[in-house]
Structure formats: structure tokens, C-alpha cells
Amino acid sequence: MRRLIPLVTDAPLYLVVSITAAPLLVILFSWWTPVDDIFIHLFKTGLSEVMINTMWLLLGVGIGTTVLGVSLAWFTTTFDFPGRSFFDWALVLPLAIPTYVLAFVSLSLFDRTGPIQQFLWEQGSGVILPPIRSTGGIIWVMTLALYPYVYLFARNGFQTQGVRANEVARSLGKHPMVTLFKITLPMSRPMIISGLMLVLMETLSDFGAVSIFNYDTFTTTIYKAWFSLFSLNAAAKFSSFLVLLVFCLVFLEEAARRRRRYTPADKPPAPVVRTALTGIPRIGVAIYCIIILLFAFIIPVVELFNKASMGFDSFRGGRSAFDLRYLGLLNRSILLATMAALLTTGLGLLLVYSERISAQLAADAPLKTSLLVRFATLGYALPGTILAVGGIMLVTFIDHRLTNGLGITGSLMTGTISAMMLGYLSRFIVLSYNSINVAMVRITPHISEAARSLGATPLRIMRKIQIPLVRGGIFSGALLVFVDVMKEMPITLMTRPFGWDTLAVQIFQFTSEGSWEQAALPSLTLVFLGLIPVILLTRPTRFRH
Amino acid sequence: MILRTNLISMKKIFLRSVCCGVMFVVGSFVVHWPHVLSAANSENEIVVYSARMEQLIKPVFDAYTKKTGVQIRFTTDKEGPLLQRLLSEGANTPADLFITVDAGMLWKAAKEGVLKKVHSPTLTANIPAHLRDPNNQWFGFSIRARTIVYNTKKVRPSDLSTYEALGEPKWKKRLCLRTSKKVYNQSLTAMMIANLGMEQTEKVISSWIKNLATDVFSDDTQVMEAIAGGICDVGIVNSYYYGRLIEKKPNSPLALFWPNQTDRGVHVNITGAGLTKHAKHEKAAILFMEWLSSKEAQNLFADLNLEYPANPTVAPDPKVAQWGTFKQDMINMENAGRLQVDAVKLMDRAGYK
Amino acid sequence: MALIQLANVTKRYPHANMAAVTDVSFSVERGKVLALLGPSGSGKTTLLRLIAGFESPDSGTVLLGGLNMNVPGKVVPTENRKVGMVFQDGGLFPHLTVHQNIAFGLHSLGKLERDKKVSEMLHLVSLSRFGTTYPHELSGGQQQRVALARALAPNPIVLLLDEPFSSLDPDMRTRMREEVHTILRGVGITAILVTHDHEEAFAMADQVAVLNSGRLEQLDTPEMVYHLPQTPFVADFVGSADFIKGEIKSDGAIHTEIGCFQNQQNRDQGADIVVMVRPDDVHLVPDLDGSATIISKQFRGSENLYEISLASGQIVHSSENSLAVYTVGTKVRIELTATHTVVFREDTLTNVLA
């Protein structure tokens, strides 16, 4: 009996792990099948270039986001300058813009054929901006889109641990600049690295922005192998290289995470006395912040509005961007996102509960439980492209087995949204898991015990205490998944069945034809949706623990 | 206090809206699910997978629906993903027709066995032989010419002759191209392989790459804007993109040039369609294709995008006609498909991104 | 008959090396307050959880109001035991107001009755103005008072307090101790208090049970526990103590370096024994011929605590009136004012002094 209990309670954990891990395993198992000439061609002509491109991208975006994120966080936490409290939260706003949207807006604005360069050309000013469709250009765009991750983590680090030490160092007569490099940065390093790892994972996963920039990386090559050269198998084999890279990052992140645990990050932020800047630095810092915000958020959004209004009546054939078709896409996107949100929330709850139960029962094996949970939520690190390839292969495989086994022709799951849901689930379950878990942690064992001692039955405890307390976490988790599925591009693009186009798919199609105006309205919709999690991220917490 | 009460009523509103949301989703799900699971529905409809952009195909569908009452449901994507979907859906596919903007993909679809032979005297009569499959598995309904465009202020037409000549040293840093990922360029290269052979074609493509003024662009419009803007002087585009741009910016210093008039002629491609092997509405789909080849539909179909009608008895849009007549490459379109993978690999080798 | 009775209770947690509670028996009379006193890991919280029903004993019986709570196959669950609990962190429901928290256990009452009871309880703990506030808006002491009111509201047969003051500031702790003491006496409820602070136990309880490593070492009134500890562990845990080597001579008295003690426990002559003395039993008199020397002094407000080195090097402590000020180095002699003699065998001392 004792032996059986862990098996039963761990079952949900194993279930979620198998869902998350399945696409990955399928990809690795693709090496069982022979290598085709498409793969050999890609390997010979593409791999080295893709590797070099990816490395440049990781390096450039890594350095760029670190410099931007850390410097902005340092300015807003340490100094006082005009607009500081505004920049404090506004600098997070670029998170609302999907990378691929920022990519096409920047490209349409700053390209050689774009309005700015054309204007300079016509003026004969001789000023030539560096070409944006280049390695530097894509690094610039992705840096602007992703720096808020580093900014958020660094700000958190500076507020919780850096500030007090900073004051001590200052009292010992050190200049703020010296303290930054001697005290603040080293102390916050694990936090900054966590943010950086998120950025690098996003960079590796990105499909939309690099496609728009025609910059060959692993994700675009996988797409090409599947949809231009029709070899799903070669796509899967190529994916496994990317998996290796991702695992390196996960490993680094794990290391950073572990170090973060030993720093007193959980203390509430101390009230901070900021140094007031004077003279040129005072204006300079404000200008620096406004420039970043301009390029990363304000200009793109204004330009989107501008293009969207052009899109309403731009095309021959009299078709405007806003019509029933758009509403249909919106409806479809919302439907998919809601289904995915419900599904991930359900499994997320299951995961949180079974983790608690299994941790209680198996007091001697907390490592096993936490390891299982870690694996179950690993999908966030896997690029959507990989999950799409793995998901489709898995669904096709199961389908063949099922139809052969049942002796029927045709298919049961191919052509349905099952592969797509599998991909979403795998990629986004971590969002609902985390927010439910954070809420669950608030329910200390004493709270449930107090309720029991007051005569409440387990059912009443669940209804009156646990559900009300976790509800907020469930909702915010579901909301995060909802918004992320709305913005999700590669999984949807590669696995959607007939009739399941979304706004993101539409954006991909329009941008690959250079129809910027047509892509603007769906993009604006996504930007507004994207503001929701940003608000969630920056809102004050309601209950103290 | 006031804040608290607000919070509570906000909570109620939130809960109610969530309930509505769930009901909406369940409702929509019930409505959509049958479409996803099976294609078995009304006889009076056709399902189309279209690689032709929505705004260029929907008016045609709408006209047909208005005329006959037949409903047309469709999805659009690039031809690769659409074909991939046809392949993986197999017998379950809801699609009756597969429309592409490229013959190569139709050839590929036929070769993969997802298309079906059509016996229609109307179609064989209306569509010339080089614009349809020798086995009548697919038919072209409009012609798209991929030709040379140049800056009228910097280039005289006499400087130009053939596609191959764009690789000459005098065009160094003066050429603009669109990405090789676009199927138009893959077909252009495939047809060039069919005419000139692999070795010669690779030399030509490499010489183009040496002459590029800047990185390849993601669409033809950008290529022309770059030429008009002085970044480069010549490029290769589909004629209708030129038509669109001139409509929008009539003062652009751009003109089309028809190359290879002394030998094989201008490279043309088709917008075409094929009946899927597992079509659930075969008759309706064939009727629709026959209507597409008729004079009435040909003008609508081609003129919407300033293309040339495939039916030789139908005259192009006057705006198109004023760009002049040209000799077209008469080699059968199936070569575009047969050599497409070779073309992609060749361009990869030549460094054409 | 005792309201709460534990007999030979043993509890071992799975995967733990040793039992949390071993063979513990005690009982509490109606209206009395019992303190379970011991260091962390001594099993005091486990005992509380056994009584509350969060755990079941491996052997032995727990009787509440004469009823066996753990008849095999028919364990009475916590919610049916009518026990009130106050936790170290209060365990308040963060999403409910103070009023709603207190009303939580009163769901069987009608709304009017319930509201009346809640305001009664709020009045009892002097928080009448705070009905609509949320727990996180209250101070730590206020939160604990709400927890107390919530636990008392359903009229439990016993109130269980699990280190209720340990998360409070020291000065707040003393004030709360007095307030809660007054409330408990006023209500006349039977209560069990878990604590590791002997002063808290002495101040609040009628009876103190001292626990060590899951075993009950002594159950007595606070005075007896302090003055007549039965084991060296108890002696050391409930206050500072010095242990001085002694010898039982033929006259029957115990001779030590600081004087003679009566052999109240009739120990055998010649045994290796030590005598426990508390600082307040030791009085020092300055004496130039004295063999002892003051080596340090700590001012403690109402008293001065002196550390004295005897001729043999043995250290004893003495607490003197704060007006009796002597400088370090002063030669002194020792006078004893003890009424009880507490003697242990020397070999039982090792684990205390270690």
C-alpha cells in the first residue's frame, strides 16, 4: 500500500511530463530513421551559416539587452531625474509588442525603401543610415523588444538586495559608479543572468522576426525543410541541433536559479533614498530613457496606428483590413486562446496539487518531485518550431497506430487542433503553474488547520478558503496563457488545421508579402492584448504573505 | 471601504464575464468542431486551399456565389504549407480545389498524388497546352510574367537584353533581387535550368549575386522602390507588382523591359488550380473551374491583379496592354515543378539567400 | 474527571529516526491552563497536534471529555473535536475581514446571532473598531488577538495555543501574555499552551509539563518545576543554575565548597553528587578574608548578576539587589538562602552541561 501511494499521486506529474516531453522525444527518435538527401543538403549548405548567424544573434542580443536592461534599471532605482517614476514602469511597455511586430514596423520605417531613408535620399543630404536588413539590424530590433526581461530582473535585484549594500558602500565613501561595479552588479548577478537567459531563450525561439528580416537561423531552416523542401524528417533532425543549444541555456539558467536561492531576495524592498542628479547627467539620463522608449514602443505604436489607418482603404479590390474576415480571425484567435488557457489551467492545477500531495507523502524524496515538476514545465524553453514538428509527428504516429489498430481508414487526430493544443500546452503550462503555485504558497498549512479546528469540513475549506485564495492566481495564469497564445506564431502557423487561422498567422502572411499596411491592424490588436500581462506584471500585490 | 466594495463588485463583474466567455467558447466550439472533424457537409459548397492572396481571390469567389449560389469556403497560406497540409490530411482533407500562384507547386502536388485528373473539354479548349498539366491534373487561369524592371533615369532599354546579361560586370552594384525563398524565383531558376542546363544556370545566378547592390528584399515592391529610390538600377519583378506601384505612385521613374525576345522569351508562370484527389464536391469544383476559364471570369480573375488572362481569346486589361506585347517562354510549366528542389539547392549553393 | 487525558501516547513520523513523542501521559482539569514547555524538537507541538487531531498516535489514547478520539476505524476528525487553535503566525484567512474571520467557525448560527457573537468577541479582545479591516492591515499583536477571538468564538471545549507569542517583538510579547492571561481567566476556558519560553509558561499556566526529546520529564506547578526540578535538564531549562560538587558526610549533611545542605532526599553516603543552586539562592557578602572573587558583573535593571569564582575555580552566579554594587575583583564569601536542596547524581549531569 505504502509503495502504491506515490505511484498514484505522482501519476498526474508523470502525465504532464509525458505530454511535455513527447514532442522532444519524437525529435530525438527521428535519428532512428535514415538520413535523407534534403537533410544532407541542409547540413552541407546551411548548418555552418545558421550556426554563425545564431551565435552572432545570441551574442549581440545578449550584450545589447544586458547593457540596456541593467543601465536603465540602475538609473531608475538609484537616481532621481525628471520623469523617473514614469520611466520606472513605462520601460516595461515594449514587452507588449511581439518581436515580429516590432521587426516589421522597424523594417518598414528604417529600410532603404522606407520613408526615412527615402526622405534623406531625396534631400540629397548624403546621410546614409546603416542598413537595417543586416545582422546588426536584427540584433537592434530584438534587443529593443527583449531588454525589458533583463530590466525587470535587474530592477528587482537592485531593489531587494543592491540598495542596502549600496548605501553601506556609499557611507564608506564610494562613488555610485564604483559601487555599481563593485557591489550592486556582483550582488544582483544571479538575477540579471536569469533575465538574460530568458532573453536568450526567446532569441533562439524566435521565428517571426528572423523570417521578416530574411535572417537564416535554426527556426527558419526547420520551417524551410518542412514547407519548402517537404521533409518533415529533415526538419526534425535539424531541430535536434537546436534542442542541444536550448539545453545548454536551460543548464545555465538552472545554475543561476540555484545561486539566486542563496541571496536574500525575498525581503520586501527597503524604502530607497535616491541620489538626485544635477546638471548634464540629469538631462542625459532622461534623454537616454526617452530615446529607448521612443524606438522600442512609442514610434512603433504610432506607426502601427498610421499604417492601420492606411490599411482601411489601401488595396485595390476595395478590401479594407477591417471587415468580417478580420472579425472571423479575431474570433478564431480568441477561441483557440481560451481553449488553450482552460486546458493549461486544468493541467496546471493538477500539477500544483499533485506536487503538494506528493511532497507531503514522500517527505524523503522532494528532489524527485521537484525534478518531475521541472521537467513538466520545461516546454517554456523549447522553441515553438520544435514543438510544432514534434507535435505533428507525434499526432501522425499515434493516428497511424490507432487507425491500424482499430482497422479504420482515414485519421482521427490529424487535421484537428490536437497537435496545436499539445504544442501550446507544452510551451505555456509553466505560466499557469507558476501563478497558481505562487497563490498556493500563500495558503500556509496553518490556514487550513485553523479552518479545520473551527469545524470546517474539507469541502468547506476548499470552497471558502482554498479556491478564493487561489482564484486570483488561476485567473492571472489563464490570462497570461490567453495572451501568449494570441501572439504565438510558429506553432499556430505550422500545425493549424483548415479554418484555424489566427491574427498572428495573418501577420506572418502579410509581412512575408511586404504588405505592412494590412498587417498593422492585427498587430495593433495584439499589442493592446499584450498590455494586459504588462499591467499584471507591474501591479502591486494585494495580500501580504 | 469604498475601494473594497468596488473590488467586490468588480469581482462579480469579472466572474460574470468569465462565465459569458466560457459559454461563448463552448458555443463556438460546438459550431466549429464539425468543420474540423469532417468535411462532409452541404453539397452546395466548395472548399478551397488558396495560395493566391485573399484580396485577389475573394472577389472571384463572391462573384461566383452571387451568380450560382454556391458557397465557397477557403483558407490562404503560402503554397508549401498548403501542400504539406493536403499531404498530411490525406483522405480527410476538406479541400476540393488547390489554387497556387506557381506551376511548380501544382506539379509537385500532382506528383505527390493529391490531385485528380479532370476530363473537361471546356477546360482543354480554353487553356493552352503549355499552361496546363499534360495529364490535365491542373490548369493555369492567368499568366504572370516575371521580367526586368529598370530606372528610366539611369538605364536605356538598349542596355538590356536578357536575364543572363544581368550578370555582366557593367551591372556591378546595380542589381536588386527578391529573396530566393519566394517561389517565383525558384520557378524562374527551374525554368532556366530546363533551358540552359544546371551548370550554366549556376554561373548566371552566381554572377547576379556578385552584382547585388544590397541584400535581397522580401518582396517585389521593395525591389522596385529601391530602384526608384536610386539604391540600384535594375531588378527582376512580376509585371503586376509594377502595375500596382505605378497606380499608387504614377511618377516613379520605372519601366518594364521584356528580355530574351530573340530566343526563348519571357519567363511566365501561372496562377492555377487542381482538383484534389479526395474532393468531396468534385462536380461543383469542376464547374467552378470551367467558369474560371470563361471570358467573363477570365477578366475578373486576371484584371484583379493586373495579370494576363490564360485564355488566349480574352484580352488583358487596357492598363496591362499598354506595357506592350511580348513573346513568352512556351516550355511546359511542369518543368518548374520537376526542377524546383534542384533550383532551391542551386540557389543555396550560389549564395542566393 | 479530567477534561483532557493522554495515556501512554507514542508518535513516530514516517522516515524519522526517532519517535517525536514517547510514552507520554498527562491530564488537564476543566478550567486549567497547562503549558507544554521544551526546546524545539522536544515533541510539544506534536502533542498539541495529537490533541487537535491533525495527527493520530501510534499507540496510547487521547481522551477529550472522556471520549476516546482514536478508536481504530473511527478517528474523530479535527472539525468534530471542538478544539480552538491559535497558531504562531495566527493562521488568519488573508482574504476575509476580521469580522468574517471570527464568524468562520459560527456557520451553524443564524446571521443575527452570529453578528452578536462576533461583536462580543471583538469587544473581548478590544478590537471592536477593526471588524471591517483585513488581516494584513493589522499589527502582529492585533492579528494574534483576532486569532484568539476566532478560536474562542465557537465555545471550544479546549483552546490550543501553539507558541502564540513567538512571532511578536519582545515588549509586545510581555503585554500580549498578560492580556491573553486575563482573557483566558475571564472566559474560564481549559487551555494548552505550547512554548519554549519558561517565563511564559510560568506566567500563564497552572501546570507545566517539561518535555525533552519526546519524553515528559516533569509535570508540576510552575513553582515546583522551578524550585524542585526533578532532572538536571529541567533544572537547567527553566532558569539559570549552577551545579556544585558535594559530598555526603557521616553527619548526613551534604558538604560543598559554599556550605552545607540538608540531605532532604536521603541520598546514600559517599555518592558522587552535585547540588543545584540558583542565583537568587546565592547571596554574597564582601569579606577581605573571603576565598571567592567577583569576576564579572552584569547590570540587569532590577538586579545585578555577579559571576563568582570559588577557590577551586568553580563558577557560581549570584543575583543581588541592584543597589548592592561591588567592583570586579572584590573578595567575597557566599551565604545560602535556599529552602529546598536539589541534588543530582553527578553522572546524570553530562548531557546538560555539554
Image (cartoon, coloured by chain):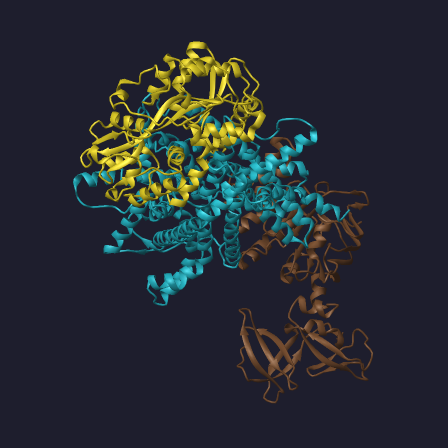
Chain colours: A cyan, B yellow, C brown
Q: Nearer the viewer, residue C346 or A217?
A: A217
Between residues A396 and B17, which one lies in front from this camera angle? A396
Left or right of B32? Residue A97 is left
- Number of numbered discs visible in the structure rendering: 0
Seen as rendered, the residue at the extreme left is A124
Q: For this rendering, which residue is in front, B11 or A11? A: A11
Determine the residue located farthest toward the front in the rendered image.
Answer: B263
Q: Can residue A443 be seen?
A: no
The residue closer to the viewer here, B153 or C305, is: B153
**Image spot of residue B209 (x, y percent):** 32, 43
Query: Considering the image in quadrants, where does the C terminus of chain C appear?
Result: bottom right
Residue C38, quarter of picture: bottom right
Q: Is residue A60 above or below residue A104?
A: below
Q: Quadrant of residue C126?
A: top right
On screen, residue A368 versus residue A426, left or right, reads right
Q: Is residue A215 left or right of residue A83?
A: right
Where does the image place residue A425, in percent across and percent down from the top left? Answer: 55, 38
Q: Is residue A330 above or below residue B345?
A: above
Above or below, A473 against B309 in this view is below
Q: Percent position (x, y) of residue C248? A: 78, 81
Q: Residue A7: x and y, percent?
A: 71, 45
Q: Residue at x 62, y 38 (%)?
A: C104
- Residue lying furthest bottom: C289
C214 shown above or below A464 = below
Q: Is residue A383 visible?
A: yes
